[in-house]
Image (cartoon, grey):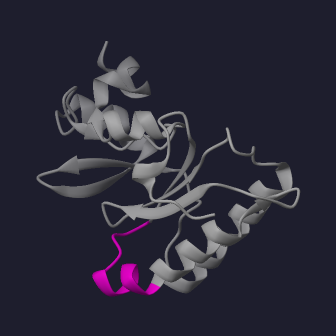
Amino acid sequence: MFVSFAALPGTARIWIYQASRPLTAAELAAVEPALTRFANEWTSHGRSLLASAAFLHQQFLIIGLDEVVADASGCSIDTSVRFVKALEQQLGVTLLEKSMLAFLHEGQVQLLDRREVRTAIAEGRIRPETLYFDTTVAQAGQLQAAWPAPAASTWLSRYFR
């Protein structure tokens, strides 16, 4: 059953998929019904899931699930990945690629190849306070509290020592 992200508890499990480019307003409007339909139809062992799906910052697909109502099973997670792959095809973007990191710079999402992080920090392009979209965040409460977060407060902190 679809619910808005605001209705999910802070303990809700989330999955974050980063698009390879920002989506246009037209693309976001066109995909909105599919997101709602997916959340409405998503099940685990025949039980409806209390879920949400939305794009944030025009570039991040967030799927949320209130596991107090029902947990995601392996089959339901496989269903969500098939949905994400279908969105990739529909939108002409990559959502499952993990080699790019996203930072907020002057109000715009900027992507950086993971292999370039050390160099970008050494050159001062990424600083401890640079806002980073940590796609490893796993709970809705973390997303709502501090996302994006200063790079030094994420797993990237080890590069600032």
**Residue 115 lies in quadrant:** top left
**Which residue is drawn at the image coordinates 14% and 55% (left, top)?**
107
**Which residue is drawn at the image coordinates 22% and 36% (left, top)?**
126
Left or right of 125? Residue 48 is right
**Which residue is drawn at the image coordinates 54% and 33% (left, top)?**
11
Residue 117 image offset from top left, x and y in percent: 36, 37
Question: With respect to residue 81, does 145 lie above or below?
Answer: above
**Which residue is drawn at the image coordinates 29% and 23% (left, top)?**
152
Left or right of 52? Residue 132 is left
Left or right of 150? Residue 107 is left
Left or right of 145? Residue 125 is left
Quadrant where the C terminus sits is top left
**Magenta-tinted stretch:** 20-30
Question: With respect to residue 1, does 90 lie above or below?
Answer: below
Quadrant where the N terminus sits is bottom right
Residue 142 image offset from top left, x and y in percent: 42, 33
Queried whether the magenta region covers residue 50, the answer comes back as no
Queried whether the magenta region covers residue 21, the answer comes back as yes
Residue 4 image offset from top left, x and y in percent: 45, 59
Question: With respect to residue 64, does 117 lie above or below?
Answer: above
**Which residue appears farthest toward the left when viewing the image?**
106
